[in-house]
């Protein structure tokens, strides 16, 4: 045999030996795993036999129950059969003991007891604001309270045992406390409402924060995909729209919209439709362009829709659409900042239910409604680094009103100081200052002048105008501080204004380690430094621009909160505050209008028909403030109060529901006017004598 052949046979034997050893080790490993698995099964079987009383007991019970004829009838129903099988599967499961131990831990037991008491309170709710009286439910015995609470406790205990993966007690507590707080806020007492609001928010926030932190694992079971988030954000926007539209339309239909300012817009849009010019007669008791008072070309956006549907209701609905559309840039900003889908929906809801978005429409339409939408889109295009759309939106902001330039200037200062975007900040600042100076010159030379008297408390020389206010701020800041929270009527108005603006957002606009970002809160100074009593009140239209800044500041600050639990906690507090604030401020505005419309809609329809049939469309008219918007579709109409009994109109339409009509009636009767028509004690029409 050759040496090479011997070497080959040796290599082959060595290879076969290694292969054999490999398979033998694999077989031993497999056998050892099987042995360990068998041993675990035997140990588990022994434990089951050792603690097998409960499974054996329930198996026997199951057998007896399933064999009964009554059960056999019910089992023909698939749903009943499925539920019973699930129940017995849980009882026979080895996890039952674990569920029992978790369900009756000390913390969950206390939580369940409080939840049971909450649901007892829920069962007693009724009588609207009767809970505000001390005598409410004083005839209820403590035994009844304890019995009802114990019954709810047993029911919730069963739920907790059956559903072991989720802390059902926290969910039930959250549900019960939400119902209670919502009801109490809905029917809040008329006295001390603000302090009641603060107390309700503080209590509800405690419950909400505890439940959210306890239910941290629930997000493992909640999967919200982007299409669902879009649908939910659209729904909250729809609710916002419906609330604003309902408030505005019911105010008009129930003859609650006055001449200032809704009658002005009704007359202006009629003239815009006829001539293309924003002419109006009932704003300064003479024919002039509204742009001589406020430069607001943005109103032309509504004109095509008004031409298609020439009705005052079109204006109310259009305002609701513009304000609700603010949900769109809020949603886009949240997506840009990489919020989760649930958080995106939540911040969209915080905008939609931000009380000032709805309460700002308490006195009907105003051009300020465009500010929130245009400003938020300006912020969005800046964030995504699209300068051209940003400047286009900035131009739209300026078109709202001459003083809208102030908001754009605040944003420019934010870019310069906080963001250090010197180019964009400088351009926007130049746009704002240049446009404001141009509008000031136009109003002072061809219009009625700038309304600098609203800041007369800051102006030493009246000839200086707004420049005098700026001078005071620069040379005497100590005096400015004395004016910050001082109000003509009540010292608490401005304090409550700050609370209503910041609390519904959980004070998140301040939640930044970067002090320069607080510039986004600075626009609130516009309403705090004035002595014009309506500006620091949320029932008026002066807050839409500020609301946009505060929402943007909140969205800007949230990504800096890196700890997820802290972010959820702060958003929970904001959600609690926003819900309570909405219920206590917005609902009382809408609910009385609905009730009034339900009871008197026939009367309002008669008034509408009477005016339409009695007053000719081409006649010149002087009308009471609440009747004027309903007959404003004419070229010449005045409010009777400001017309000073001048006999230069053909008809005088008086609202006889209010006693103030008598002075105008007597004055025009002396001037030779006669009663032309009358609708019982509601409307009287006087006509100029032809003699």
Image (spheres, rainbow, N blue to C red):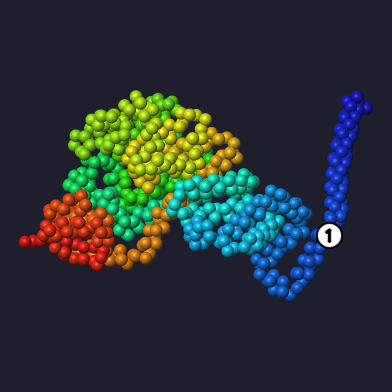
Residue 675 vs residue 275, the one in the foreground: 675
Q: Residues within 10 Å of mark 1 (few under 14, many from 20)?
A: few
Indicate whether 477 appears above or below 23. Answer: above
Q: Which quadrant would residue 677 be assigned to in this image?
A: bottom left
The N terminus appears in which quarter of the rendering? top right
Whether residue 371 is visible to the viewer of this picture, yes or no, is no
Q: State the image coordinates of residue 509 (x, y, percent, origin top left).
A: 48, 37
Residue occupying the point 89% across, 34% down: 17
The C terminus appears in which quarter of the rendering? bottom left
Element class at badge 1: helix
Whether residue 192 is visible to the viewer of this picture, yes or no, is yes
Indicate whether 434 appears above or below 179. Answer: above
Horizontal arrangement in the rendering, residue 210 relative to residue 483 (left or right): right
Q: State the image coordinates of residue 380 (x, y, percent, origin top left).
A: 43, 37
Q: Which quadrant would residue 467 be assigned to in this image?
A: top left
Residue occupying the point 52% across, 47% down: 199
Residue occupying the point 52% across, 30% down: 513
Residue 352 vs residue 152, the one in the foreground: 152
Residue occupying the point 27% across, 49% down: 260
Task: Name the residue tied to disc 1.
Answer: 53
The residue lying furthest to the right in this view is 1
The residue lying furthest to the left in this view is 691
Residue 64 vs residue 126, the one in the foreground: 126
The residue lying furthest to the bottom in this view is 69
Q: State the image coordinates of residue 118 (x, y, percent, origin top left).
A: 60, 56
Q: State the image coordinates of residue 661 (x, y, percent, origin top left).
A: 22, 58
Q: How many marks?
A: 1
């Amino acid at each position: 045999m050759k040496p090479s052949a011997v070497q080959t046979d040796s290599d082959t034997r060595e290879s076969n030996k290694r292969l054999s050893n490999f398979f033998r080790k694999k077989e031993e490993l497999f056998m050892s795993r099987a042995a360990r698995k068998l041993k675990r099964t035997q140990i588990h079987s022994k434990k089951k036999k050792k603690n097998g009383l409960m499974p054996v007991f329930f198996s026997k019970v199951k057998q007896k129950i399933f064999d009964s004829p009554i059960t056999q009838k019910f089992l023909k129903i698939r749903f009943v059969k499925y539920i019973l099988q699930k129940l017995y599967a849980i009882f026979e499961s080895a996890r039952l003991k674990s569920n029992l131990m978790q369900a009756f831990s000390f913390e969950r037991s206390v939580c369940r007891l409080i939840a049971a008491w909450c649901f007892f309170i829920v069962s007693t709710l009724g009588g609207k604001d009767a809970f505000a009286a001390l005598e409410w439910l004083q005839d209820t015995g403590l035994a009844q309270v304890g019995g009802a609470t114990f019954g709810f406790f047993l029911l919730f205990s069963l739920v907790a045992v059956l559903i072991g993966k989720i802390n059902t007690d926290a969910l039930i507590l959250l549900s019960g406390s939400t119902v209670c707080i919502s009801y109490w806020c809905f029917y809040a007492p008329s006295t001390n409402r603000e302090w009641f609001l603060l107390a309700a928010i503080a209590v509800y926030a405690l419950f909400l924060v505890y439940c959210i932190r306890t239910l941290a694992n629930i997000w493992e079971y909640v999967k919200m995909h982007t299409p669902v988030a879009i649908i939910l954000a659209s729904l909250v926007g729809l609710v916002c729209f419906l609330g604003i539209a309902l408030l505005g339309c019911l105010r008009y239909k129930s003859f609650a919209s006055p001449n200032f300012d809704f009658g002005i817009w009704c007359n202006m849009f009629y003239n815009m439709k006829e001539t293309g010019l924003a002419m109006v007669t009932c704003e300064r008791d003479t024919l002039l362009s509204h742009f001589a008072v406020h430069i607001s070309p943005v109103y032309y956006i509504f004109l095509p829709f008004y031409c298609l549907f020439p009705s005052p209701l079109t204006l109310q609905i259009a305002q609701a659409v513009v304000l609700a559309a603010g949900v769109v840039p809020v949603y886009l900003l949240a997506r840009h900042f990489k919020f989760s889908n649930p958080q995106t929906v939540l911040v969209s809801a915080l905008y939609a239910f931000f009380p000032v978005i709805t309460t700002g429409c308490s006195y009907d339409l105003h051009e300020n409604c465009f500010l929130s939408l245009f400003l938020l889109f300006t912020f969005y295009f800046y964030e995504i680094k699209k300068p051209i759309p940003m400047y286009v939106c900035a131009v739209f902001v300026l078109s709202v009103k001459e003083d809208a330039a102030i908001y754009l200037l605040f944003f420019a200062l934010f870019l310069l100081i906080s963001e250090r975007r010197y180019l964009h900040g400088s351009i926007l600042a130049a746009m704002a200052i240049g446009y404001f100076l141009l509008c000031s010159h136009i109003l002072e030379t061809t219009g009625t002048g700038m309304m600098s008297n609203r800041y007369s408390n800051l102006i030493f020389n009246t000839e200086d105008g707004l420049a005098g206010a700026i001078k005071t701020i620069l040379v005497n800041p100590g005096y400015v501080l004395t004016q910050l929270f001082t109000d003509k009527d009540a010292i608490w108005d401005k304090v409550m204004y700050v609370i209503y603006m910041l609390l519904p957002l959980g004070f998140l606009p301040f939640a930044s380690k970067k002090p320069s970002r607080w510039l986004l809160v600075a626009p609130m100074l516009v309403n705090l430094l004035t002595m014009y009593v309506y500006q620091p009140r949320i029932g008026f239209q002066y807050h839409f621009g500020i609301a946009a800044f505060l929402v943007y500041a909140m969205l800007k600050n949230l990504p800096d909160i890196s700890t997820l639990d802290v972010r959820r906690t702060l958003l929970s507090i904001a959600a609690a505050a926003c819900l309570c604030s909405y219920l206590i401020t917005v609902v009382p505005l809408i609910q009385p209008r609905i009730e009034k419309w339900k009871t008197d809609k026939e009367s309002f329809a008669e008034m509408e028909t009477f005016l339409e049939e009695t007053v000719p469309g081409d006649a010149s008219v002087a009308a009471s403030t609440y009747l004027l918007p309903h007959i404003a579709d004419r070229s010449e109409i005045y409010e009777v109060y400001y017309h000073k009994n001048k006999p230069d109109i053909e008809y005088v339409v008086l609202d006889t529901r209010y006693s103030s009509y008598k002075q105008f009636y007597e004055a025009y009767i002396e001037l030779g006017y006669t009663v032309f028509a009358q609708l019982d004690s509601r409307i009287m029409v006087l006509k100029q004598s032809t003699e």
